[in-house]
């Protein structure tokens, strides 16, 4: 087994110590679970740690990974992703939500913008672990 980079870090934004190890549902923790800010360390893929930028990445919103259910040929709502923008170079990254991210902080990102009720509903469903029902 390759040794993964699982270093603990201190959040650049809120200063809290973040443990990179734990049952968080994702292999690479790259953002703070308390304030959701991240650091620009990945270049092309999550976890590659190839970027030299090191800028602070601002959580700007959420999006859903697109996925399709082949059997039913219907577009499905995929996994909830956090969107970060680097303050230094402007790069946009999408990151998986970790199991211990503060759901209230994630909801704030949704509330701050003119997001449709359907999206808010879907975000809540994913955050609080209920089945996703799309109401039309
Ligand atoms: Zn933080
Ligand atoms: Zn950057």
Image (cartoon, rainbow, N blue to C red):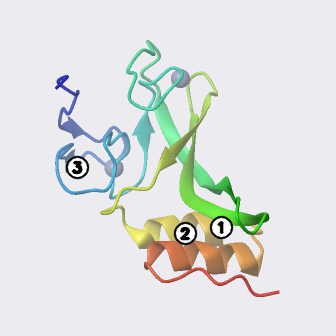
Q: Where is residue 93 shown, x and y percent of the image?
A: 57, 36
Q: Secondary structure at mark 3?
A: loop
Earlier-in-chain disc, 1 versus 3: 3
Is residue 27 positioned above or below 117 on the image?
Answer: above
Task: Please tell me which residue is depicted at 55% across the width and 59% down the height of the picture.
Answer: 79
The residue under label 3 is 16
Q: Secondary structure at mark 2?
A: helix
Which image quadrant is residue 132 in? bottom right
Query: Which circle marks residue 121 in the picture?
Result: none
Earlier-in-chain disc, 3 versus 2: 3
Give 59 or 73, whichever is nearer the viewer. Answer: 73
Query: Which circle marks residue 108 in the picture?
Result: 2
Mark 1 vs ligand 1: CB below 8 Å: no
Mark 3 Cα within 10 Å, few/some/many (few <14, many 20+)?
A: some
Give 70 or 23, whichever is nearer the viewer. Answer: 70
Give the CA distance from mark 3 to mark 2.
19 Å
The residue under label 1 is 112
Instruction: Give the quarter of the figure containing the N terminus.
Output: top left
Is residue 12 positioned above or below 114 on the image?
Answer: above
Is residue 84 positioned above or below 97 on the image?
Answer: above
Tag 3–tag 2 contact (CB < 8 Å): no
- Say left or right for 116 vs 59: right
Give the CA distance from mark 1 to mark 3.
24 Å
Instruction: Give the quarter of the figure containing the C terminus.
Output: bottom right
Tag 2–tag 1 contact (CB < 8 Å): yes
């Amino acid at each position: 087994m390759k040794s993964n980079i699982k270093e603990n870090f201190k959040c650049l934004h809120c200063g809290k110590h973040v443990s990179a190890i734990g049952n968080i549902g994702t292999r690479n923790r790259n953002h703070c679970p308390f304030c959701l800010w991240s650091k620009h360390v990945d270049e092309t893929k999550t976890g590659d740690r190839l970027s030299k930028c090191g800028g602070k990445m601002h959580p700007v919103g959420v999006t859903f990974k697109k996925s399709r259910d082949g059997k039913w040929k219907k577009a499905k709502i995929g996994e909830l992703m956090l969107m970060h923008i680097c303050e230094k170079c402007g790069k946009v990254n999408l990151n998986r939500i970790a199991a211990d991210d503060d759901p209230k902080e994630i909801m704030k990102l949704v509330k701050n913008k003119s997001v449709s009720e359907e999206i808010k509903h879907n975000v809540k469903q994913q955050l609080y672990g209920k089945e996703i029902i799309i109401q039309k």
